[in-house]
Image: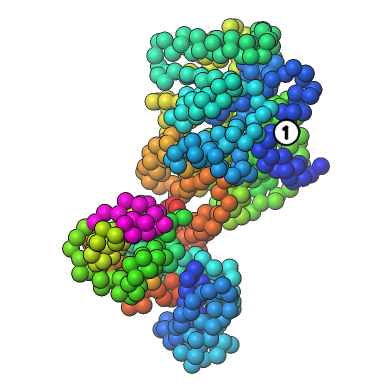
Amino acid sequence: MPIARLIESIRQKVDDPSYPEIAEWKASHPGGKAIGCFPVYIPAELIHAAGMLPVQIAGAMGNVKLDEADGYLQSSVCSVGRSTLELKIDGHFSGLDGMIFPSVCEISRGLSGVLKRYDPDFPVIYIHYPQNLKSAYAKDYLVNELNRLKSVLENLSGNKITDEALLDAFKLYNERSELLSELAQFQLDHPERLSASESYLLRLAGVVVPAERHNAIIEEALKLLKDSGDRHPVRLRMVLTGAFCERPPVEMLETIEAEGVAIIHDDILLGQRWWVEKLPLEGDLISILAENYLHNTVINPVVFQPESTPCNHTLDIVERTKADGVIIASAKSCHPAHHDSHCIVRICEEHGFPFVRLEFEEDQRVFESTRVLFEALLEARERLPIAGTDKGNNVVGST
Amino acid sequence: MITAGIDMGSKTIKVVILKDGEIIGKSIELAGFESREAAEKAFAGALEAAGIAQGDIEKTTATGAGRKNAPYTEHEVTEVGSDARGVRELYPNARTVLDVGAEEGRAIRTTDEGKVLDFALNEKCAAGAGAFTESMSRALEVPIEELGPLSLQSDASIPMNAQCAVFAESEVVTLVHAKTPKQDIARAVHDAIASRIVSLARKVGFEPDVVLIGGVAYNTGFVDSLERALETKIIIPEDPEFVGAYGAAIIAAEGL
């Protein structure tokens, strides 16, 4: 099967907001339960080790009308927050046996409370991550929190989380990390053969299929990609940052790519690639999870790491990848993304990196202004050095 | 060399014909539902004004929101590019271009050499564009061309809180019911649009000279509001809504 056909088959699946794979998984795992995981990061390893299916909640992508959720939530709530509630109200989450929310932002916190009140019989679990990673008590605190989550999951599933099962889960997710790293490297090295939107769709498959199958899909994709030819013209290579939580519409990336702008690095679906290095497989596994959250987490806007902020991280990435510029793409009303966008702008200005700022929503369907933004960016760099002669002017743009 | 620039705006279509850099013909038509037909009509009008035939035009460049649908066009350029080029030709000292059209506002900052350095577009917000003044003139029952002079009669500063044109109309209705003088409401409307354009201008870090183009530049009340908000004098070209088409015609001549 050519790579384009594999990616197209995934596109058909990821737009179904009813998570049909849950029913399929349950049919092959009698008595098994599925747990929804609100972004950005939930320790799926623990859910898997409890014999349950971790389901990454990633909104409705505009496939569900937000009629009722808007009655519960104020308009300043991000789209993924509103669509998650709508999916619950509309019955799309009927296959889920509970949901876990992480302490990443006010929306996640508030939504967990709204869901609890909306359906008191639906198990809603909230995990508190430490805010001060430097504190001497951070690790002990997180070990306690993970043990609390472990026992909640054991009660829900009726299964004991054994060291053996947790070790198997570590191996499974380590394998996924490795495969996704390879995919990201391919996207960076060969943007003419693998576009960001295609890479994104391959990652999105992990939202609708279990990790075992996702790994097989990525493995197959990597094999197909090695034999694939150039399919995408590349006029500019840019890094995209700010879309770590809410899913940007695939069409938004395709609009950008249609102009010849290759996104060689992005932070979309960051929770799938949470660990910088693979998890160690020896020692107390809960302690390993806690230790790695403190010291092995990818730089991101929802974990406060004073020495390695997303702003410095963006600078590192641009310099490492020799990118031509930065796309600062923040989900509408995403406070962590907007907070960091200001210092990323400053860093781009200080270092003379061209950058583009844009805002998106998961249910956005019109991308005309996005197209104009990138057309104008390319035009200014390539075609309209109006009075000068060099083509490297640091043009920036925003909507 | 004779070239043409066609600006396929969301409300109007403008055509400018240049001969060796001089404007020899121009025309404007409402876009309506059949924008291509309207464009052909605008083209015919400009040709007539120039006293030449279609075949005399060597190159045509399209710009504007509907540029993909423009007739007689060899290539296209974004509104950002055509605006910057047109203004550069008219005002070499311009560093900031503000373009407020019917449906969109944009701010462009250029370098000393006239290159585009930064730009910002307003999105999904009629409150920062000409359509807003039109709906407000209907609400106030004042012809659109009288809205500007009317607001200049006011010294009152009434803040409008609504962030959206639809809600702002409700706010205007409330002011009307409260017997607020029409001139004060007109000024409040212009101040509201200006504040959105100023936020775009600040986004790109505006510096003088500031040139305002687009159809809303004809509105003296809006210009007054914008000058007060930016605390700077604004330059208005003679034909502000033709500057994009003019820039496109220059770009056609330069073959960029």
Q: What SS does tag 1 mark?
A: helix
Q: Camera-side residue: A57 or B3?
A: A57
- Mark 1 chain: A
**Rendered image quadrant of residue B100:** bottom left
What residue sits 52% from the left and 44% below the top? Answer: A361
Q: Which residue is nearer to you in this view: B256 or A110?
A: A110
Check residue A237 for magenta coloring: no
Magenta stretch bounds: B158-174
* Position in image of residue B20 (x %, y %): 44, 84
Residue B85 in the image, given as x and y percentages of width and height: 41, 69
- Residue B59 in sight in this render: no
Look at the picture and state if A106 lies above or below A257.
Answer: above
- Disc 1 residue type (three-letter): Pro
Image quarter in which the N terminus of chain A is found: top right
Residue B63, given in percent of the width and then of the height, sits at 50, 69
- Residue B163 part of the magenta-drawn span: yes
Could one spot residue A63 in this view of the protein? yes
Q: Residue at x 33, y 67 (%)?
A: B140
What is the total number of numbered labels drawn onto the structure image?
1
Give the labeled residue for mark 1.
A20
Badge 1 local density, few (<14 within 10 Å), some, or many (20+)?
Answer: some
